[in-house]
């Protein structure tokens, strides 16, 4: 995976989303293709929840 530092706008958007998550419980969204930050939302669809669970590696 390529690492690229966040530009100023991306950094501000991510910080705002993290604050929203901490203060108001807003969900932080991630792009499924490259795991980049994709915004935040009040409501999360069932499909997004299922995809998030599937993306977590499980080693039993």
Image (spheres, helix red, strand yellow):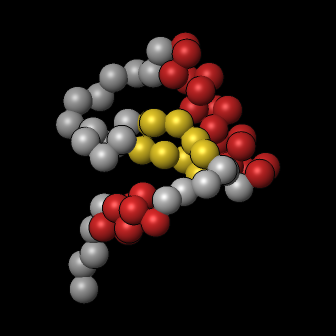
- Front residue of 7 and 27: 27
Residue at image point 49% right, 59% down: 45
Residue at image point 47% right, 15% down: 7
> Residue reaching furthest left?
1
Residue at image point 63% right, 38% down: 17
On the image, which quarter does residue 14 sit in? Answer: top right
Taking the image as shown, residue 17 lies to the left or right of residue 24, namely left
Q: Could one spot residue 5 in this view of the protein?
A: yes
> Residue reaching furthest right?
23
- Front residue of 32 and 6: 32
Residue at image point 71% right, 55% down: 25
Where does residue 41 sit, x and y in percent of width and height? Answer: 60, 45
> Residue reaching furthest bottom?
60
Q: How many marks?
A: 0
On the image, which quarter does residue 35 sit in? Answer: top left
Quarter of the picture containing the N terminus is top left
Taking the image as shown, residue 53 lies to the left or right of residue 14, namely left
Where does residue 18 sit, x and y in percent of width and height? Answer: 64, 42
Quarter of the picture containing the C terminus is bottom left
> Residue reaching furthest top?
8
Where does residue 40 sit, x and y in percent of width and height? Answer: 58, 42
Taking the image as shown, residue 6 lies to the left or right of residue 41, namely left
Where does residue 3 sit, x and y in percent of width and height? Answer: 29, 28
On the image, which quarter does residue 53 sit in? Answer: bottom left
């Amino acid at each position: 995976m390529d690492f690229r530092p966040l530009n100023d706008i991306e950094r501000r958007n991510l910080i705002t989303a993290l604050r929203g998550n901490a203060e108001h419980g807003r969900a932080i969204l991630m792009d499924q293709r490259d795991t980049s930050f994709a915004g935040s939302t009040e409501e999360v669809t069932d499909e997004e929840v299922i995809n998030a669970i599937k993306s977590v590696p499980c080693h039993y």
